Amino acid sequence: MGISDWFYYSLSCLDYTLFYIGLHRPKTAKLVVVGLENAGKSSLLQNLANRPPGFAVDTSHPGLETLVRGSISFTALDVGGHHQTRELWTKTICGASAVVFMVDAQDAE
């Protein structure tokens, strides 16, 4: 076993030990969901948050949602698709870990 293998193995053992005793910090990520109005952005986040469909959401202002998947905690930002809120898109995607651009495939426009 080389030094790099030993180092990787040691870090893996340390990570597992910290996780086992509850000292492991979960990873965090910022997710921004943008797209035109009625594309399904809020519905996607409601589904990921395990909320029932049809839950009314006001998208005149960006909405925050915290989602946990495995050891990753996502702060999801739902940015409306109306003309007034589109100006916020460039400001909100800065520093994002991931950006989802929702498209309604059935919308002919």
Image (cartoon, rainbow, N blue to C red):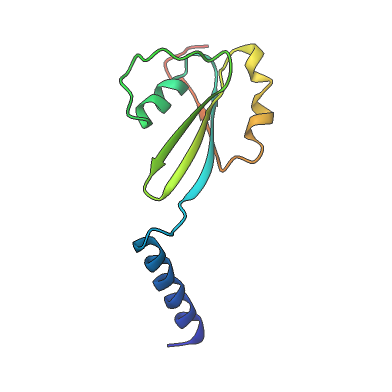
Q: Is residue 86 left or right of residue 40?
A: right
Q: Quadrant of the N terminus?
A: bottom left
Left or right position of 22 against 38? left
Between residues 73 and 89, which one lies in front from this camera angle?
73
Q: Position of residue 34 (x, y in %)?
A: 55, 26
Rendered image quadrant of residue 24: bottom left
Q: Residue at x 64, y 26 (%)?
A: 89
- Seen in the picture, residue 23 relative to 99 is either above or below; the reply is below
The percent position of residue 55, horizontal first and vertical second, equals: 37, 15
Give above or below for 65 relative to 57. Answer: below
Q: State the residue in front, 1 or 72.
A: 72
Q: Position of residue 39 (x, y in %)?
A: 47, 18
Q: Nearer the viewer, residue 23 or 69?
A: 23
Image coords of residue 82 (percent x, y): 59, 12
Along the horizontal axis of the image, is 86 left or right of 53? right
The residue at the point 36 percent across, 48 percent down is 70
Q: Relative to residue 79, is residue 72 drawn left or right?
A: left
Instruction: Name above or below for residue 72 compared with residue 84.
Output: below
Picture quadrant where residue 21 is located: bottom left
Front residue of 52 and 39: 52
Which residue corresponds to the image point at 56% horizontal and 43% vertical from the top-left?
Answer: 97
Residue at (53, 11) in percent of width and height: 109
Count of marks placed on residues = 0
